[in-house]
Amino acid sequence: MRILLTNDDGINAPGLAVLEEIAAEIAGPEGEVWVVAPAFEQSGVGHCISYTHPFLINKMGPRRFSAEGSPADCVLAGLHDVMGSTRPDLVLSGVNRGNNSAENTLYSGTIGGAMEAALQGITAMALSQYYGPANVNSEDPFEASRAHGAAAVRAVLEVPTPNAEYVLFHNINFPPVAAADVKGLKAAPQGRRENVHFGVEAAHAPSGRRFLWVRGGDQRAATAPGSDADVNLAGYISITPMRADLTDRDALAALGEHLG
């Protein structure tokens, strides 16, 4: 199997090293693992692409490249430049430092990389490691994803996916616990943390200039029972199938009836 990797934390991120271990296990001794990752951190860029300006790409080693662009840019570079005419069988994005459950999904560059692969017709998964009191200060905060990542990816690959205009991709989030405390895998819808949203906080530089920092909300706030963040906080790996089609079918039907 040929696997292309990217992330949004950057080419030197520890989570990418974890993803390389996972991919090597999935690809097997006869497979290939390629890396095209951002040269610097791109967290929160979503599905952004560098449409109005070019981006620099550098070869850092065999099958390993950095690009001065977003995760989606990196996928485009991998598919249409770096890997030549032979497309990968699978694109993996991550392992993100922090969860991409609930509303975080909409902002995530990790998700953006997987979404771009799906738009290109490639099977893709985004992998993220939830942080919490039980693992954030541990020797290996990625222990749960390192130990269970390959099994989670294989579980998704074993399930047939229906054909549709928009190719399916999967959002996988590992719980904020030690590997031994992971309770298993759960299929879960995307949740919404109640009263949690991003905002800004003002700060002044020594020069007196005023800046704004973007701040997130409480990552342990409740979501609907059985949704991604809810099962993550209960110790389960959440797997959420997604498509880039943002149409709300129920609202579309209601609108159609109203418009006649």
Image: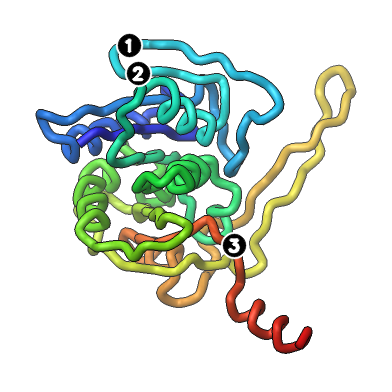
In the rendered image, which residue does mark 1 sit on?
61
Q: Which quadrant of the view contains residue 84?
A: top left
Task: Specify the amino acid type for callout 3.
Answer: Leu
Percent from the top left, x then y, of residue 24? 20, 32
Q: Position of residue 112 (x, y in %)?
A: 52, 43
Q: Dot 3: few (<14), some (14–19), or many (≥20) neighbours within 10 Å?
A: few
Provide the residue designation for mark 2. Answer: 64
Tell me if residue 40 comes above or below residue 211 in the rendering.
above
Q: Give the mark nearest the N terminus, 1 or 3.
A: 1
Q: Amino acid at mark 2?
A: Arg
Query: In the image, is 211 to the left or to the right of 134?
Result: right
- Up the image or down, 72 lies above or below 53; here it is below
Residue 98 in view (yes/no): no
Quadrant location of residue 211? top right
Q: CA gap, disc 3 to disc 2?
A: 33 Å
Which corner quadrant of the image does residue 117 belong to? top left
Give the numbered dot on residue 252.
Answer: none
Residue 216: x and y, percent?
64, 50
Residue type of the residue flagged with mark 1: Gly
Instruction: State the residue in front, 222 or 72.
Output: 72
**Side (left or right) of 38 relative to 185:** right
**Percent coordinates x, y for residue 80 in the rendering:** 44, 27
Residue topped by disc 3: 246
Label 1 CA crowd tier, 10 Å (few <14, some 14–19, many 20+): few
Task: Tell me if I can see residue 111 in this picture.
Answer: yes
